[in-house]
Image (tube, rainbow, N blue to C red):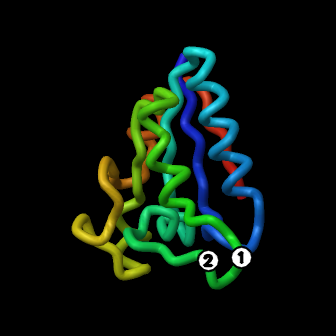
Amino acid sequence: MSTLIMIDQPPYGAWTGREALDMAFSLAAFDQPASLLFSGAGVNWLRQGQEAGAIGQKSVEKNLSAAPIFGIEAILADRAACKTFGLDESSLIEGVTLVDVDAALLTDYHHTAFAG
C-alpha cells in the first residue's frame, strides 16, 4: 500500500509541512511506500538555493536531500503551482518530477494524507 503525502504549506513560518515530511520519512523507514506531492505554496520547498539562516531556520533543501536515503519513492511538484510561483525544472532541487494533479494521479495511491 502506497501513501501520498501532500504538502501545500510554505516551507517556513509553520511546522505543518515539516511534520508531514517527518511522517513520510517515518513511513518509508518502516518499509511503507511513500511519496511527497508539493502543491500551492508548498512548491517553494523545492526551490534551489534557499537561505533560511536569516530567519533562524535550517534550509528545507537539506531535509529533502535525505528523502532517497529514507526510501521516499518520489518527490512530485504540481506543474501549475510551480508556474504560479515562477519555478521551472531548472530552479527545482534534484529529483523532482513535475506532474499534473488530477484524479488519475491520486488513484495511483492507496492512502493520501494532506498537510495543510
Q: Secondary structure at mark 2?
A: helix
Residue 89 vertical placement versus 64 (above, below) = below
The CA distance from mark 2 to mark 1 is 5 Å
Furthest-right residue in view? 15
Q: In the structure shown, which secondary structural element does the residue marked by tag 1 occupy?
A: loop
- Identity of the amino acid at label 1? Gly
**Quarter of the view holding residue 41:** bottom right
User: From the viewer's perspective, is 16 left or right of 40?
Assistant: right
Tag 2: residue type? Answer: Gly
Residue 44 x %, y %: 49, 70
Residue 18, position as x, y percentages in the image: 68, 53
Q: Are marks 2 and 1 in contact (CB under 8 Å)?
A: yes
* Nearest to the observer: residue 81 or residue 104: 81
Q: Quick one: 46 or 77, which is closer to the camera?
A: 46
| Residue 32 percent across, percent down from the top left | 57, 18
State the mark number for residue 56: 1
Residue at 51% in and 64% down = 45
Above-or-below relation of 115 to 26? below
Residue sitting at 49 percent across and 50 percent down?
64
Q: Which residue is mark 2?
A: 53
In the rendering, at what x and y percent does residue 74 appear? 40, 38
Give the quadrant of the N terminus: top right
